[in-house]
Image: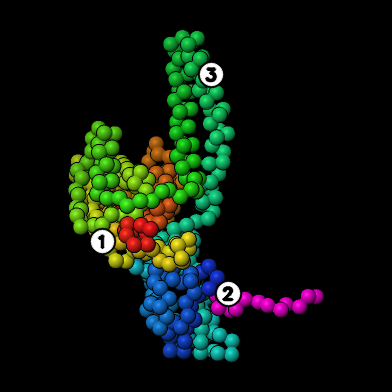
Amino acid sequence: MSQITHRPEYSQMLASIAVPVLLISPDHLITYANDASEAFFGRSRRRLEGHRIDEALIFESERMNAALLAREGDISAQDMELKTPYGVIMVDINISAVAKEPDWRIAVISPRNGGREHIGDQRDSGQQQAMGAPAILGHEIKNPLAGIKGAAQLLARQVDEKSRALTELIVNEVDRIARLLDQMQKLGRSERPELAPANIHLLIERAIRSLRAANRAMPEISINYDPSLPDVYIDADGMVQVLINLLQNAIDALHGRLDGVIGISTRYVMSGALRDTDIDRRAIKLPVEIAISDNGAGVPDHIVDELFSPFVTTKRDGQGLGLAIVRKLVQQMNSRVLFERDHALGQTTFRLLLPVASGKASE
């Protein structure tokens, strides 16, 4: 058996763990936080270390909050509701005493469902792989579709009027499937778009003009812009597509309502941040917010958690790809999209958090 002469430092191993790991002192202070903790909490290690554990971890369960400070044996709990600045997420948590130092503890936090609800991580590797499959198969499927469409068009010249309706049905269905494949292929593309400074208000107006041309009737649109906002660092065409998809969803949600109103607002916020391992492993600030709201019926509770997944929809004739494309495009622009429903006000809101086109971003 060969002898091991070298192994990584324990600090390197802790830093490499993909879930948050915290070291807690006897007086309940966080004395170490790994890289995943910074991404999860949206705070730098400097802002985590030295603070009390019950300031960082606040659960819906008061019993769990009390157990954090009790130090009475190890804690292992699943499906706990953890409060964050971005909403409540489900986590598993394990807190255990350090060997030979029983007053010291290590906390390991594992977000459920990949932590998709958390602003710092909206990536789901399994879903990304599922999105990639249509990109691989799309070309092979489109070739026979083109042959079927061509054969149906030729056949339409040789049949009577009654049978021609069937050939038109074939052509229309082939076109519909081809459009669906185009949308699915967009989900599977992994290349990064070209980002550049852009005026977000001009892009919103561009999206509104496009929708007015495509819809015979439009609900009232209430606009509240912050004119002092700086340019954002995004892909302009991709952002217009995102805005069109979100606004079209709002239009569909208000169909048939005489009191339907779409709200569009922009503002500067301080809380948005994104962890990007491709950029010096530092947090990217997302201070520009666009909020698109409507007073429609909202989304059924049973699909809220999968709202941005492909093929999830409440529309009878929908394909369930609009919000999946939104999420994909927003991720590629180092930005974030959040969903919330205010039941008291009867209002659904999608929030886009975008980076400013200045300093490191514009470089």
Q: Residue at x 45, y 28 (%)?
A: 175
Q: Position of residue 219 (x, y in %)?
A: 22, 41
Nearer-the-camera pick, 360 or 334: 360
Alpha-carbon span between mark 2 and mark 3: 61 Å
Q: Is 165 part of what is drawn in magenta?
A: no
Local crowd at mark 1 within 10 Å, few (<14), some, or many (≥20)?
A: some
Report the residue marked by disc 3. Answer: 151
Quarter of the figure with residue 321: top left
In primary-sequence order, the first of circles 3 and 1 is 3
Q: Position of residue 147 (x, y in %)?
A: 55, 23
Report the residue marked by disc 2. Answer: 13
Classify 226 as above or below 30.
above
Nearer-the-camera pick, 118 or 113: 118
Report the residue marked by disc 1. Answer: 268
- Residue type (three-letter) at the residue carrying disc 2: Met
Q: Nearer the viewer, mark 2 or mark 3?
A: 2
Residue 98 placement, left or right of 339: right
Alpha-carbon span between mark 2 and mark 1: 38 Å
In primary-sequence order, the first of circles 2 and 1 is 2
Q: Nearer the viewer, mark 3 or mark 1?
A: 1
Residue 266 placement, left or right of 148: left
Magenta-highlighted residues: 1-14
**Residue 66 in sight from this viewpoint:** no
Quadrant of the rendering where the C terminus is positioned: bottom left
Nearer-the-camera pick, 63 or 69: 69
Quarter of the figure with residue 86: bottom left
